[in-house]
């Protein structure tokens, strides 16, 4: 059952959305702690987010941008803001769809279904030794352990995995991240590699990424 997180501060609207989604065989939940919204999203890890833009404590567009920087979760903006500039900003920050209130419940459900179909088609799972890598959710799964990677960490790991047992230069990695619209400096790459190594060690893969001095990195 797909999990949908509702980020909406109007309680009556949130309850109506939850009832609609529950009746449509989704597992819907309502975000309660707006002050720590990003942390709540990370803890919940929904399959899709319905996001209002007018929220307490944080601007919805900023929250959208922050979520997209760290997680690759489909997001539908559901808002009373009808200005074209708001839609442009939301889409530029990574929204997958933009629906204005009042919404047609049937149309909303069709949009959700269509988005899930697109996501399911591109969702890719890779393997590294005895671990599974869910690229779209940024997760490493091994036995009963689950490690979350940031977007940059997942991009680096997937590139190293696709070139396993080959030396990958730092320039290659930086270019690859640039191709995915992620600006990463040389120092930032070092930090991301270090964090990735630590996370791999957490699930038992010590010394998985080896540094070849003057050449680059190799995933063993």
Image (tube, grey):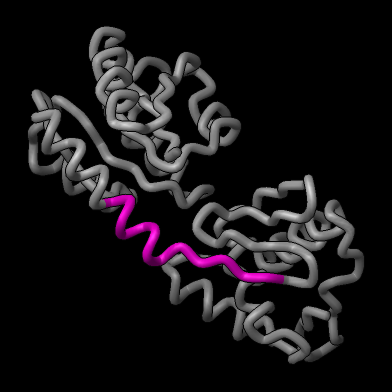
Q: Quadrant of residue 85?
A: top left
In the displayed structure, 48 sits above or below 155; it is above
Q: What's the magenta region?
A: 115-127
Q: Left or right: where does residue 130 sit relative to residue 15?
A: right
Q: Quadrant of residue 191?
A: bottom right
Residue 84 at x, y percent in the picture: 8, 42
Residue placed most toward the observer, 209 or 109: 109
Q: How many marks?
A: 0
**Which residue sits at x=67%, y=86%?**
163
**Which residue sits at x=40%, y=26%?**
28
**Which residue sits at x=32%, y=14%?**
9
Quadrant into which the N terminus falls: top left
Magenta span has 165? Answer: no
Seen as rendered, the residue at the extreme top is 12
Q: Main secondary structure of the magenta part?
A: helix
Q: Left or right: where does residue 179 sit relative to residue 145?
A: left
Magenta span has 116? Answer: yes
Residue placed most toward the observer, 97 or 153: 97
Residue 126 at x, y percent in the picture: 62, 70
**Which residue sits at x=37%, y=15%?**
56
Q: Quadrant of residue 4?
A: top left
Residue placed most toward the observer, 73 or 142: 142
Residue 63 at x, y percent in the picture: 41, 34
Quadrant into which the C terminus falls: bottom right
Residue 72 at x, y percent in the picture: 46, 52
In the displayed structure, 22 sits above or below 88; it is above
């Amino acid at each position: 059952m797909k999990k949908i997180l509702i980020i909406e501060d109007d309680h009556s609207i949130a309850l109506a959305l939850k009832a609609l989604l529950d009746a449509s065989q989704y597992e819907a939940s309502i975000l309660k702690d707006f002050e720590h919204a990003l942390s709540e999203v990370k803890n919940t890890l929904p399959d899709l987010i319905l996001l209002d833009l007018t929220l307490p404590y944080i601007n919805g567009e900023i929250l959208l941008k922050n979520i997209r920087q760290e997680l690759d979760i489909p997001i539908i903006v559901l808002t009373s803001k009808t200005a074209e500039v708001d839609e442009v900003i939301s889409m530029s920050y990574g929204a997958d769809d933009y629906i204005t209130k009042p919404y047609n419940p049937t149309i909303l459900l069709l949009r959700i279904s269509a988005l899930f179909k697109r996501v399911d088609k591109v969702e890719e799972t890779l393997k590294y030794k005895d671990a599974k890598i869910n690229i779209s959710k940024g997760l490493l799964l091994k036995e009963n352990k689950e490690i979350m990677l940031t977007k940059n960490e997942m991009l680096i790991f997937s590139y190293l995995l696709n070139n396993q047992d080959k030396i990958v230069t730092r320039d290659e990695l930086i270019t690859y991240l640039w191709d995915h619209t992620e600006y990463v400096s040389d120092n930032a790459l070092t930090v991301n590699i270090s964090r990735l190594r630590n996370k791999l060690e957490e699930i038992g893969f010590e010394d998985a990424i080896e540094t070849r001095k003057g050449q680059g990195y190799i995933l063993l």
